Image (tube, rainbow, N blue to C red):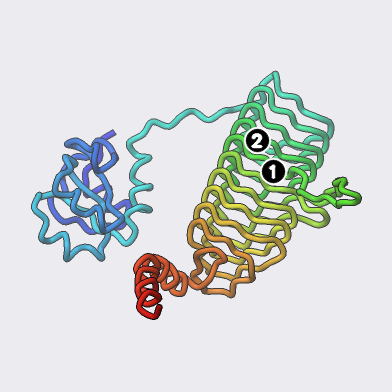
């Protein structure tokens, strides 16, 4: 498919600088692009690549308009508020859509009293236990297991080899990627005489609308009540969420983060890669936790923390700066000791 640049600009409500009639054949990466491609730059440090790219056009931020007026290479530009989001609307126009699964595969095992909405698709070797409810237009890929009395909303997409344990409740438009396990037992044991006795995990997991869960994520069921993931939250691959955890709306959780049992995470929180959160603490709304931080105490709202134990980011930077100076400080103290002696 081909589009004029003016058509694309109209789609994303952008402002064109350059040839509005240039023909675009593909949306592509800025380093690999060729003539006829459109690219995007969202991060200012990559603006210099616009001088070397072979692309015919680029989607860029309005805030960089002054900087780009001095660029070396003439290149048609579309200025928008959010280049990454705008480009995500353009890219599908140049890709062929993969046919969606349809119908119930004959190898799927469907239990008793299962309710399937209109146009539900269930692929090969799926197991759906008794009393499950699946909403309209939801797609279940091959090898998925859905436990008894679970409920999955409309327009969901469950990829291969996902396990959804009993009594799990999933909202609408939820995407769960390959290998995720939802509702496994919480890690609960009581020790007596050096022996660890399992504590039954009787609760469930509830996932709100528009949540996306990455590959090989594990979300444990609650001991009682529920483990809850709020509406619009996005979870990267390889995240562990313990039992009775509560996560607010529109939170971002990046890969290899671990959240211990009964922690409460607020709305619009960002947990960067490899963050660890202790159990039974709270993280307020709009908190940002930098990568590889260890959160051991409750964090108030609207705070940016880093380090271990996590502390305000400015304080942590000062500490890191002091640590970098330790060799010189040690040398100075040694000289003073010799002088005193």
Query: Hey, which quadrant is residue 44 in on the image?
Result: bottom left
> Residue at the spot x=78%, y=39% of the render?
132
Position of residue 326 measured from the top left corner of the image (x, y, whole percent): 40, 67
Residue 162: image tag: 2
Total number of numbered labels? 2
View extreme (bottom): residue: 340
View extreme (front): residue: 341
Residue linked to disc 1: 182
View extreme (top): residue: 106
Q: Residues within 10 Å of mark 2 (few under 14, many from 20)?
A: many
144 shown above or below 332: above
Q: Quadrant of the C terminus?
A: bottom left
> Residue at the spot x=63%, y=33% of the render?
140
Q: Nearer the viewer, residue 330 or 288?
A: 330
Position of residue 269 measured from the top left corner of the image (x, y, whole percent): 54, 64
> Residue at the spot x=60%, y=39% of the render?
216
Q: Secondary structure at mark 2?
A: loop
Tag 1–tag 2 contact (CB < 8 Å): yes
Q: Nearer the viewer, residue 245 or 156?
A: 245
Query: Hey, which quadrant is residue 64 in on the image?
Result: bottom left
Q: Nearer the viewer, residue 23 or 171?
A: 171
Q: Quadrant of the N terminus?
A: top left
Position of residue 261 measured from the top left corner of the image (x, y, whole percent): 72, 57
Position of residue 263 measured from the top left corner of the image (x, y, whole percent): 69, 62
Q: Residues within 10 Å of mark 1 (few under 14, many from 20)?
A: many
**Disc nearer the start of the sequence (1/2):** 2
């Amino acid at each position: 498919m081909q589009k004029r640049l003016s058509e694309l600009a109209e789609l994303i409500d952008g402002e064109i600088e350059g040839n509005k009639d240039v023909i675009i054949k593909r949306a592509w990466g800025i380093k690999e692009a060729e003539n006829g491609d459109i690219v995007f730059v969202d991060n200012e440090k990559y603006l210099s690549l616009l001088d070397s790219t072979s692309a015919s056009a680029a989607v860029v931020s309005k805030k960089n308009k002054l900087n780009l007026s001095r660029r070396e290479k003439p290149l048609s530009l579309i200025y928008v508020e959010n280049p990454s989001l705008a480009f995500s609307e353009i890219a599908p126009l140049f890709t062929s859509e993969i046919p969606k699964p349809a119908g119930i595969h004959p190898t799927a095992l469907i239990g008793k009293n299962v309710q399937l909405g209109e146009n539900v698709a269930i692929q090969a070797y799926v197991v759906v236990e008794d009393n499950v409810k699946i909403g309209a237009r939801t797609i279940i890929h091959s090898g998925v297991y859905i436990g008894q009395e679970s409920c999955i909303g409309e327009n969901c997409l469950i990829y291969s080899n996902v396990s959804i344990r009993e009594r799990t409740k999933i909202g609408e438009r939820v995407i769960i990627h390959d290998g995720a396990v939802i509702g496994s037992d919480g890690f609960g044991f009581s020790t007596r005489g050096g022996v660890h006795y399992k504590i039954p995990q009787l609760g469930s997991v509830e996932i709100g609308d528009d949540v996306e869960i990455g590959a090989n994520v594990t979300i444990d069921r609650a001991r009682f009540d529920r483990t809850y993931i709020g509406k619009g939250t996005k979870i990267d691959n390889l995240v562990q969420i313990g039992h009775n955890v509560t996560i607010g709306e529109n939170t971002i959780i990046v890969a290899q983060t671990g959240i211990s049992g009964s922690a409460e995470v607020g709305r619009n929180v960002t947990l960067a890669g490899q963050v660890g959160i202790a159990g039974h603490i709270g993280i307020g709304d709009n908190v940002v936790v930098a990568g590889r931080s260890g959160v051991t105490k409750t964090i108030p709202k609207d705070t940016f923390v880093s380090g271990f134990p996590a502390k305000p980011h400015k304080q942590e930077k000062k500490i890191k700066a002091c640590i970098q100076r330790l060799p010189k400080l040690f040398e100075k103290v040694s000289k003073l000791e010799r002088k005193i002696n």
